[in-house]
Image (tube, rainbow, N blue to C red):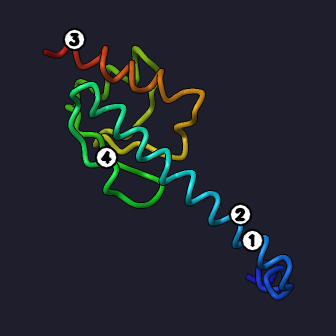
Amino acid sequence: DFIMEKYLSNNDKQKDFKTKINAMASRINQTRLEFSLALRSNNISNNIHEGKGMFSLLSLSKEEIESLQKNYHIYLLPNGRINICGITDNNMSYIVKSIIDNRKSFI
């Protein structure tokens, strides 16, 4: 607490901190939207774009989640919770393609 209190008591550092927080939130929101649209454009319905924060739920079966983990090395919790912050411009297409290819094996 003391370190942040001391850091944020400086107006320039406080402005810088707010700028960085806003940039991070903006990136998460943009990633969330792009991820949602990429899934929807491949007929995978979701409500990811409506969420807030760093995590979101994918509506996948237990078997689909286990397969994504084992076969594609995409790590999410057993309930389908995925870290949106871990999705980047460099790996989004791989994640989306993996979800699509994985889903085909369960249809």
Residue 23 quadrant = bottom right
**Amino acid beneath label 4:** Leu
How crowded pointer 2 is (Cα within 10 Å; few <14, some 14-19, many 20+) is rated as few
Secondary structure beneath dot 4 equals strand
The answer to which of marks 2 and 3 sits earlier in the sequence is: 2
| Percent coordinates x, y for residue 26 in the rendering | 56, 57
Position of the N terminus, as image quadrant, is bottom right
- Of badges 2 and 3, the one in the foreground is 2
**Amino acid beneath label 1:** Phe
Q: Are marks 2 and 1 in contact (CB under 8 Å)?
A: yes
In three-dimensional space, the C-alpha distance between marks 2 and 3, rounded to whole angstroms, equals 41 Å
- Residue to which mark 4 is pinned: 57
Who's the residue at 34% across and 57% down the image? Answer: 51
- Residue to which mark 2 is pinned: 20
Is 54 left or right of 59, judged from the image as shown?
A: right
Q: Are marks 3 and 1 in contact (CB under 8 Å)?
A: no
- Residue to which mark 3 is pinned: 105
Residue 68 quadrant = top left
The answer to which of marks 4 and 2 sits earlier in the sequence is: 2
| Percent coordinates x, y for residue 33 in the rendering | 41, 46
- Residue to which mark 1 is pinned: 17
**Amino acid beneath label 3:** Ser
In three-dimensional space, the C-alpha distance between marks 1 and 4, rounded to whole angstroms, equals 29 Å
How crowded pointer 3 is (Cα within 10 Å; few <14, some 14-19, many 20+) is rated as few
- Of badges 3 and 1, the one in the foreground is 1
100 versus 92 height, above or below: above
In three-dimensional space, the C-alpha distance between marks 3 and 1, rounded to whole angstroms, equals 46 Å
Who's the residue at 49% across and 49% down the image? Answer: 30
Q: Nearer the viewer, residue 103 or 38?
A: 38
